[in-house]
Amino acid sequence: MPHFEFAKSTYSSGNGECVEVAGNIPTTIAVRDSKQGNGPILRLTPTAWAAFTAHLGVL
């Protein structure tokens, strides 16, 4: 299993309810809930992540 280096946005509040993202593995973007550090990880290709984040900009 790869070692993901998760980070959260600087826009996050201090209440611990954040989405963390790891992009240190070139072929995978990993996303998880900060409240569940040992919980499930959503794995996306960089292409899928780019499409997802681009769509957020139009909401």
Image (spheres, rainbow, N blue to C red):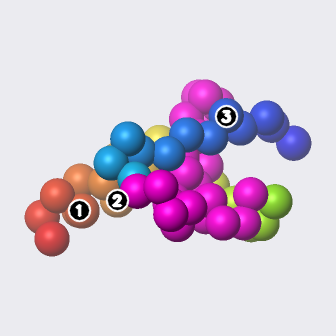
11 to the left or right of 18 = left
Query: Mark 3 or mark 1: which is in front?
Result: 3
Residue shown at the point (50%, 45%) measured from the top left = 8
Q: State whether residue 37 is above or below residue 2.
A: below
Q: Disc 1 on helix, strand or loop?
A: helix
- Image quadrant holding the N terminus, namely top right
Which residue does the image show at 61% across and 49% down from the upper left? 30
Q: Amino acid at mark 1?
A: His
The mark found on residue 5 in the picture is 3
Instruction: Tell me the magenta residue range.
Output: 13-37
Is residue 5 or residue 26 the one in the foreground? 5
- Which quadrant would residue 16 be assigned to in this image? bottom right
> What's the distance in space between the residues labelled 3 and 1, CA to CA?
24 Å
Which of 45/41 is in front?
A: 41
Disc 3 is placed on an element classified as loop
Q: Is residue 24 above or below residue 50?
A: above
Check residue 15 for magenta coloring. Answer: yes
Question: Any mark on residue 21, and which?
Answer: none
* Above or below 37: residue 36: below
Q: Are marks 3 and 2 in contact (CB under 8 Å)?
A: no
Q: Label 2 amino acid?
A: Phe
- Under mark 3, the amino acid is Glu
- Report x, y in % for residue 13: 40, 56
Circle 2 residues within 10 Å: few <14, some 14–19, many ≥20: few
Do labels 2 and 1 touch, CB within 8 Å?
yes
Look at the image and tell me whether residue 42 can be seen.
no
Q: Which mark is residue 55?
A: 1
Q: How many residues crowd around disc 3 within 10 Å: few (fewer than 14), some, or many (20 or more)?
A: few
**SS for tag 2?**
helix
Q: Which mark is on residue 52? A: 2
Q: Nearer the viewer, mark 3 or mark 2?
A: 3
Name the residue nearer the viewer: 54 or 18: 18
